[in-house]
Amino acid sequence: MRFITRDTDYALRAMILMARALRYKDKKVISVEDIVSGEKLPKVFLRRILQKLAEKKILSSYKGKGGGFSFLISPEKISLADVIKVFQGEIDLTNCFLKGKVCPNRPECRVREKIKAISLRVVKDMDNITIEEMSE
Amino acid sequence: MRFITRDTDYALRAMILMARALRYKDKKVISVEDIVSGEKLPKVFLRRILQKLAEKKILSSYKGKGGGFSFLISPEKISLADVIKVFQGEIDLTNCFLKGKVCPNRPECRVREKIKAISLRVVKDMDNITIEEMSE
DNA sequence: TTTAAATGATACTAATATAGTATCAATAAG
DNA sequence: CTTATTGATACTATATTAGTATCATTTAAA
């Protein structure tokens, strides 16, 4: 079972590097080339990932020579949950679970409630882990 | 993101029906046909799922006319986590996460520890939800 | 002893999701 | 003008998930 897909993984790694470059070198704008030269990631694939983060207003992007990506939201305000959501949709451990006749979708179903509670706590916990923290 | 696959889902539904048949009708052995006639599940697919549960010593199987499957472990001792493990392997929310250069697998990595903690709690919680409980 | 109803085992196909490549257009610095 | 960048999109490859088909084996019961 893969909870975190490669998109999410690469996005996290890239942003961790960006956060470090910002903190230690005051380097704000980073190109895809900068990132893939350090990490061994497929360039075009990563580019599309950063594009998506820009589209979602988490990063800014700059075209042309000397261009690249920078944080639009600061790294201490971007959570693990945020990143997962961008690439994998809402975090929901209850999906595909007992949708048939066995357990119709009644609100009073206690088991469903329990699993939902587990799921919500996971989201809450992952909301408290930030890119800034990960880059330390 | 799909946390629970269809195998797991079908296995749960089947065992919930079995637990009910046991409790209300004292019916111990149930055939795949019994299950698919109530729920709308693909028969051969479900059979393979129950076969696997038998192989894992969760169910017993009986061949021949009048045969079918019964619980080898009683339903109040089979947990949601057990079933997920059979069809999807160990529950591990940290897989595929930061395996590259950014965060080598050092034990002192705090973020990894945090995610591991979340993951372990999910397993623990899912270990406390039983088939018996689900069938109530 | 024959038949029918069941699981055991295995091979195959289909659909979907994930991962990655290729390519060209647009932009902006120098 | 050239070069280094992102934007956009179409394509291919691989892996996972879901499901089908088929035949062998077993056992109860007619």
Image (cartoon, coloured by chain):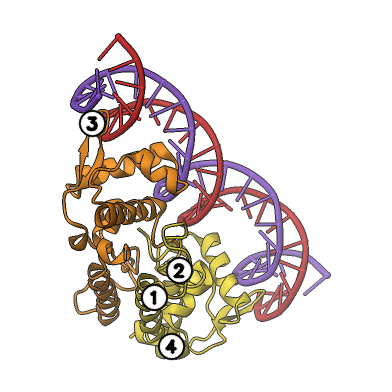
Chain colours: A orange, B yellow, C purple, D red
Q: Nearer the viewer, residue B112 or B67?
A: B112
Tell me the residue at 47%/56% (across/down).
B100
Disc 3, SS: loop
Q: Are marks 2 and 1 on the same chain?
A: yes
Q: Nearer the viewer, residue A67 or C2?
A: A67
| Horizontal side, residue C5 vs residue D27: left or right | left
The quarter in which the N terminus of chain B is drawn is bottom left
One can see residue A105 in this view: no
Task: Determine the CA span between mark 3 and mark 4.
Answer: 70 Å
Label 3 resides on the chain identified as A
Residue type marked 1: Glu
Residue type marked 4: Lys
Task: Determine the CA span between mark 2 and mark 1.
Answer: 28 Å
Q: Could you say where residue B92 lies in the image, as x and y percent from the top left?
A: 44, 71
Q: Nearer the viewer, residue A50 or D5?
A: D5
Tell me the residue at 29%/72% (across/down).
A122
The residue carrying pointer 2 sits among few (fewer than 14), some (14 to 19) or many (20 or more) residues within 10 Å by Cα, namely: many
Task: Determine the CA span between mark 1 and mark 3.
Answer: 38 Å
| Horizontal side, residue B76 vs residue A136: left or right | right
Label 2 resides on the chain identified as B
Q: Are marks 4 and 1 on the same chain?
A: yes
Tell me the residue at 39%/36% (across/down).
A44
What label sits on residue B25 in the rendered view? 4
